[in-house]
Image (spheres, grey):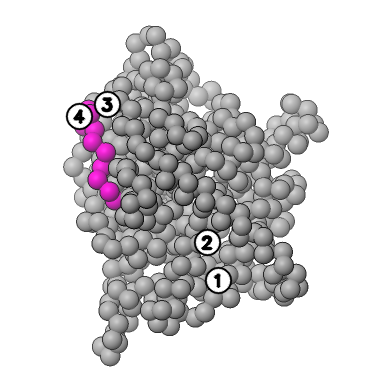
Amino acid sequence: RRYGGLSLTHLAHLTPLSVSFLNHALRSGMVRLRLRAHFTRAAKLPLAVPLRSFSRAAPPAAVSCEPLVRTMVSAQSQSLAHQLPLARHYSATGGGLEEELQTAAQREQTSVTLKATLDTGLGLLLPESSSSEMTRRQRTLIQIAQFLRRELPVRLARRVVELKSLPGGLDEVSSVQRVRDWYQHSFVEIRRSAPVVCAQSEGDFCRLLEGIYERHAPTLVTMAHGVHELKRRLESEHGKGFDFGAKTDIHDFLDRFYMSRIGIRILIGQYLELHREPQAEGYVGLINRHTSPAEIAEQAIYDAAYLCERTHGDAPEVKIYGRSDGNFTYIPSHLYYCLFELIKNSLRAVTEHHGADNALPPIKVIIADSESNEDVVIKVSDEGGGIPRSHMPRIFSYLFTTATPAFGGNDAFSSAGDHGTDSPLAGLGYGLPISRTYARYFGGDLNIMSMEGYGTDAFLHLSRLGNRAEPLP
């Protein structure tokens, strides 16, 4: 159901809104709804279909979302309002800011692993301190805040410096400049923050990061808008035949930028989630020690089938094979994003290739998992006609897509989430490259094999060990 321009799809895929905001909305009574457990840790949506077979799932029940709409608009307005004092502050600091950015950007980043992030959240890496009157939880939060206060300026500065010297005229696009200002502003705020030495200063730092987390929520969409702006500009200069997808320097920058963004969002999001009490069973911040691939596949199938039915009028059956009771330590929202994108692509391909009025061959989701496996491997297999061999080298490019972009103008980019058919990212070809970036972040990968005229197999590899360091750009 739509309410004030916000669809249920947006509520179901609100990654641009912070998890912390959603938890606050639920717990404070601002909104009453049952979102997916791996986003809000609220009760899981009931499924009307069994584990092994999913077909034509009914749309989720209507919810009252007016309070959330008002809050979203307010949060977006506050994010834009942050930019107003920016110019005054920078003019007051003069050239000192540029020098500070360059110095910070030259410092080494500290790469983290999933296991280290989990152990830190559990307080296992605390130094021995028998004399401290603070609780173990307080000491853990202070330890993490101190690390973030050192690490985040380095990561933010590197992105600011790169955003000021982008290839192909991308640094001249207004949307990209807006993103650069957000990163620069956040850098200044953290650098000017007081040292974290006690519970009070740690609380102040937490509130600062909550604002920064919200400010950067539209980054993915805003950057995509900037790239599309540049594409339209180059096409107007060189004609419609201009091969924008061949600009590998821009693609390589976007790969680095989005990998860095995921890292920053995890560091801040993990810290903010550790502040929430009580933690849901199995969770340590964003990390679930009992992440179930089968359960997340169920929810991804449910959501993707709903979107497919709404768009095409029908959806193929999706069947799950393999181990359904396995679990491992992972960030559920990352796994959900990858599976949702892969299943959504398969549903669309099968429906368009065979036609909604004809019999639709089922899609297979195969989970290969064992306690002795190095990886959890999930295969999504369809009979959707496959991908032409000439397109295969570019399927992971942010600059190449065969679909029609879903947005119609600048306003769309500030009013929707990253996901779903209503999203301004829909049709831009971001689903596969972002999914691969999520998979690679903690040592996994995403591979596509296709047989033109028949179908496509996608192989999602996720490391069970949690000891692979993030690949920092």
Decide: few, some or many residues near mark 4? Use Cα within 10 Å; few <14, some 14-19, many ≥20: few
Write down the residue under mark 3. Answer: 54
Q: Give the image location of residue 115, x and y in percent.
A: 33, 62
Decide: few, some or many residues near mark 3? Use Cα within 10 Å; few <14, some 14-19, many ≥20: many
- Mark closer to the observer (2, 4): 2
Cα distance, mark 1 to mark 4? 48 Å
Q: Give the image location of residue 436, x and y in percent.
A: 46, 43
Q: Residue furthest top?
A: 358
Write down the residue under mark 4. Answer: 50
Looking at the rendering, the stretch of residues picked out in magenta corresponds to 41-51
Of label 2 and label 1, which has the lower sequence position?
1
Of label 1 and label 4, which has the lower sequence position?
4
The amino acid pointed to by label 4 is Pro
Write down the residue under mark 1. Answer: 190
The amino acid pointed to by label 3 is Phe
User: Is residue 110 visible to us here?
Assistant: no
The amino acid pointed to by label 1 is Ile
Side of 57 relative to 450 (left or right): left
